[in-house]
Amino acid sequence: MTSAAPQLTLGPVLYNWPAEKRRDFYFRIADEAPIDVVYIGEITCSKRAPFFSPYIPEVCERLEAAGKEVVLSTLALVMSRRERKELNELASESPRPIEANDLSAINLLRHKKHVIGPFVNVYNEGTLEHFYESGASRVVLSCELPSTSVAQLGKAANGRELEVQTFGRLPLALSARCYHARSHNLTKDGCQYVCELNPDGMDVRTLDGTPFLAVNGTQTMSYTMNSLLGELDHLKEVGITHFRLWPHDMDMVEVAHLFRNVLDNPEDSKKSLGLLQEIVTIAPLSNGFFHSTEGFRMVE
Amino acid sequence: MELVCPAGTPSALNAALKAGADVVYVGFRDETNARNFPGLNFSPDELKVAVAQAHSMSRQVYVAINTYPEAGNLPPWHRAVDIAADIGVDAVIMADIGLLDYTARHHPQLRRHLSVQASASNPEAINFYRATFDIQRVVLPRVLTVREIAELTGEVEVETEVFAFGGMCVMAEGRCSLSSYITGKSPNMNGVCSPASHVGYEQRGQKLVSKLGDFTINAYPDGEAAGYPTLCKGRFIGQDSDPSYLFEEPTSLNVMALLPELIKTGVKALKIEGRQRGKAYVAQVVSSYRRAIDAVLRGDALPDSNLGSITEGARSTAGAYQKNWR
């Protein structure tokens, strides 16, 4: 429906990776990945932010020099005075577009290019229209929407930019409590940054050992790895313009190539899905939300 | 200080009013509210009677229309708002921006409260809703400490309402897709979490296992009372091999001990959770809180309350209201 080329995007790193690892990751993305838009910023826990902040300027410059659009993402659950102040500074001073992951920045962003992130609830055309009207250039949809809703929203977007999460563990829930710390018998204040131990999140199993969820600090993730690789062509047809990959501790350049290839050559989707399954070894793939069933399921 | 109490049935509404509720909040019998359980909630006719009854006692009725309308299917939610306005309810409680927009445009006189499902956790977010949709009150997410509530209440231009008692989400409300990941049914879209339709119990040797969909949530040795398998309140295996209540224990929120402190924060209303509860439960919780609030406001000591027996797992917590919960 849309004439512009589909855009591949890279969401912010949701996990606590060491700052240098994060920097090197983005340098490689800049140099090698067929990605159009890169979102950067700490959205999970404000305690982690200071470590990577000093690297952000050089990372942005490298990505932009490679022709990529850089968007700065904001924290998803904003509570403390410090968090509010930091958000305020980012929204008012950043020369780059902002992805708002909670509504606190929205008034500051009215006259600035911005994206409504996936942590803001957009379930229907009424809400979608409100955000476009107040100046959002793009809206990223929540992960639990079924294909029927995505299609309705694509129709309502009518050529305006709309993004769907197409790869990676899905951020399912946010909390004031840190479950990573709790699992180490620590509290959030004295967390010792134990979330750094699990670069793709900490697997959570049931009492009988069945994989269940994954924990990333204050965030609870799907255990399975969402993949809409097989649904990309359908998504394009219903008006989705941007396709998000969530960064994981694996060969994301290769993952990006697979998605780029299927966006450009839909007939390769089956073969590419097989290749993706070989790269993703941490958990099975899933696409249940999109197919109106339990999120953890994979519908062929 | 307003005491806002739940009712899932006309008889629970009676019980709440009788026990001293200032306000009773209810929902329609469909997917427009976050307690869309079988056999629960109000028809438009029942709501009309309820509002007349409450108003005759100089009390109020709020209506929760607080799920997120389905794309391409907005009429059920719009109709719910229209009916609530026609009946003359005292406020509607809503979370979705599109629905707030509809209500502000079509029923500007209908008082709007921001549901906890909107997860507005700071003054900037709350003031956005105030400026854009003229909300009069915000129900605060259960993520803030008492100190943060006091600061926030001083900084916003609307009334604040906080949860005092009942079931407790450990996740930021309205921003949780755990239930739909495991069962396909979500609070935001279907008005349910860990729905009864997906609950099962299974005897395995000496243990009774509780399940939600395909997943084991907890196991109880013979003789131990089995709880409802709410998915974030089960025992799971995380960092080490020992199972633990990784997210939260099966427990209820009870702020009774913090009541004097909480009242001092300047919040306008205290809310009891539990539209799915029976009238006996509602009567007991509401009357305990009525007595306690009245005592604190008189400057008396907190009276004894015996709510321990009706809390989940006979346990209670002050949850996020205390910083060490985090």
Image: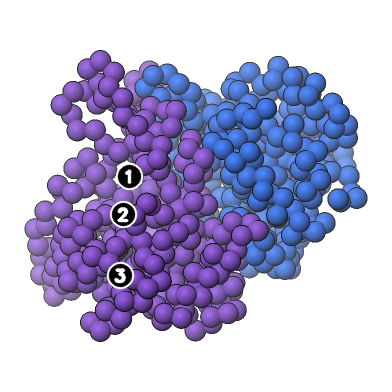
Chain colours: A blue, B purple
Residue at mark 2 to residue at mark 1: CA–CA distance: 30 Å
Residue A232 location (% of width, % of height): 77, 37
Residue annotated with mark 3: B24
Q: Earlier in the sequence, mark 3 or mark 2?
A: 3
**Chain letter for mark 1:** B
Q: In the image, what residue type sits under mark 1?
A: Asn
Q: In the image, what residue type sits under mark 2?
A: Gln
Query: Position of B11 compared to B200: left or right?
Result: left
Residue A300 location (% of width, % of height): 67, 27
> What residue do we see at 40% from left, 43% from top?
B195
Residue annotated with mark 1: B324
**Chain letter for mark 2:** B
Residue annotated with mark 2: B276
> What residue do we see at 54% from left, 29% from top?
A223
Q: Say whether residue A187 is visible.
A: no
Disc 2 and disc 1 on one polypeptide chain: yes
Q: Earlier in the sequence, mark 1 or mark 3?
A: 3
Q: Residues within 10 Å of mark 2 (few under 14, many from 20)?
A: some
Q: Earlier in the sequence, mark 2 or mark 1?
A: 2
Query: Position of A110 compared to A237: left or right?
Result: left
> What residue do we see at 70% from left, 34% from top?
A228
Question: Which residue is more in the foreground, B148 or B217?
Answer: B217
Q: In the image, what residue type sits under mark 3?
A: Val
Disc 1 and disc 3 on one polypeptide chain: yes
Residue A141 location (% of width, % of height): 66, 49
